[in-house]
């Protein structure tokens, strides 16, 4: 196959791909505690998918990365975001109804320095996850579309 990446590039991709994914999801989940959030983490995860496309080409990732699946993930993220925005509508749009309510994300936050408790954000972590899903899926669809268009252009030139 013409233009195939070297074994070094493929090996490094296999080594760092998982770390990029974990770091991206870390940024998404910790977005209400540290700099970052859904958009930034989603872009990091999408960059891991872009690395796969660059390393293995469009044909190499077509069996694993499907545009239809990512379109579904994107729609799920959007619906989740809008749903949680409307859930607080009894008070106001985007009301943080889970804050200080107990449970999974409702523990009260300590006044002063934040110790980094993930379960103190109310609906904010859920919104970050929804935005992260939407961004990672949308950017991946864009990457896959551009890769497919590039393949078609190369075939026409030859």
Image (tube, rainbow, N blue to C red):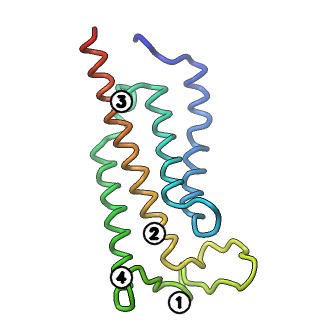
Q: Name the residue under label 4.
A: 87
Which residue is found at the position 31% from the left and 22% from the top?
A: 151
Residue 1, image x, y percentages: 40, 11
Q: Tag 4's secondary structure?
A: helix
Q: Residue 65 location, x and y as percent?
A: 37, 39
**Which of the marked residues, 1 or 3, is nearer the chain's N terminus?**
1
In the image, 47: left or right of 60?
right
Nearer the camera: disc 1 or disc 3: 3
Q: Which residue lies furthest to the right in this view?
A: 113
Q: In this view, does 154 lie to the left or right of 52?
A: left
Numbered badge on residue 147: 3
Task: Return the disc, 2 or 4, that comes first in the chain's sequence.
Answer: 4
Residue 72 position within the rendered picture, expressed as x and y whole percent measured from the top left: 29, 54
**Label 2 Cα crowd, 10 Å radius (few <14 / some 14-19 / many 20+):** many
- Judge whether 114 appears above or below 132 on screen: below
Q: Position of residue 68 (x, y in %)?
A: 27, 46
Residue that sits furthest to the top in the current view: 158
What is the C-alpha distance between the residues marked 1 and 4? 14 Å
Distance of label 2 from label 1 (alpha carbons): 17 Å
Q: Name the residue under label 2.
A: 127
- The numbered mark, 2 or 1, whose residue comes first in the sequence reads 1
Count of numbered circles on the image: 4
Secondary structure of the residue carrying tag 1 is loop
Q: What is the CA distance from the residue labelled 2 to the residue labelled 3?
A: 30 Å
Q: SS of the residue at dot 2?
A: helix
Q: How crowded is mark 4: few (under 14 residues within 10 Å), some or many (20 or more)?
A: some
Residue drawn at x 36%, y 27% as measured from the top left: 58
* Location of mark 1 (residue): 101
Task: Please name the residue shown 36% across and 49% down the image.
Answer: 138
The correct choice, above or below, for 69 with respect to 153 in the image is below
């Amino acid at each position: 196959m013409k233009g195939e990446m070297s074994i070094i590039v493929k090996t490094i991709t296999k080594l760092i791909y998982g770390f990029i994914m974990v770091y991206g999801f870390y940024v998404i989940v910790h977005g209400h505690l540290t700099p970052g959030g859904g958009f930034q983490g989603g872009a990091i995860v999408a960059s891991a998918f872009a690395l796969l496309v660059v390393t293995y080409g469009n044909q190499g990732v077509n069996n694993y990365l499907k545009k239809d699946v990512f379109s579904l993930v994107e729609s799920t993220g959007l619906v989740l975001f809008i749903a949680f925005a409307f859930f607080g509508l009894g008070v106001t749009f985007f009301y943080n109804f889970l804050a200080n309510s107990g449970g999974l994300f409702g523990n009260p936050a300590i006044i002063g320095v934040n110790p980094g408790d993930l379960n103190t954000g109310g609906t904010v972590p859920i919104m970050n996850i929804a935005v992260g899903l939407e961004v990672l899926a949308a950017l991946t669809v864009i990457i896959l579309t551009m890769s497919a268009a590039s393949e078609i252009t190369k075939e026409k030139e030859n």
